[in-house]
Image (cartoon, rainbow, N blue to C red):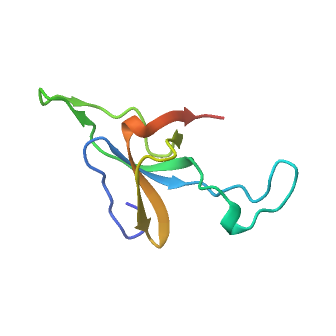
Amino acid sequence: MIGKLNIKPIFDNVLVKPLEAEQKTATGILLPDSAKEKPQIGEVMAVGTGHVSPEGKVRPMSVKVGQKVMYKKWGGNEVKVAGEEWMIVEEKDILAVISK
């Protein structure tokens, strides 16, 4: 449950909350909002049940709620959740799980 919304992706879809874009460059220059790139890293907020094969078998998801992931720049769909822009991506569009 996310706030007052109960969002459960279906099949192999993943709901991702993008992390904030960098506020400044590596050299310390502050970036205006118009110059910031959308992040490709976010936190998994909800996951579907898994990929269904042509034979009807369900392959469980390999990502879990709470993990930080890197996803394809042009993959997924932007959705509004509680006034914020989040992403719904297919599991195949997640490139990596990020750990500390």
Q: Where is residue 54 in the image (x, y as percent from the top left)?
A: 14, 29
Q: Residue furthest bottom?
A: 83
> Quadrant location of the N terminus?
bottom left
Residue depicted at 50% across the width and 42% down the height: 71
Q: Nearer the viewer, residue 19 or 39?
A: 39
Q: Position of residue 68 (x, y in %)?
A: 55, 43
**The C terminus lies in quadrant:** top right
Q: Is residue 4 placed above or below 26 in the rendered structure? A: below
Q: In the rendered image, which quarter is residue 38 located in? A: bottom right
Residue lying at the far right in this picture: please name it.
Answer: 27
Residue 63 pos. (x, y %):
42, 36
Residue drawn at (54%, 54%) of the image = 18
Query: Residue 15's spot in the image, x, y percent?
Result: 40, 52
Relative to 36, residue 97 above or below = above
Q: In this view, does 37 lie to the left or right of 59?
A: right
* Residue at image point 64% right, 55% down: 37
Q: In this view, does 57 lie to the left or right of 67?
A: left
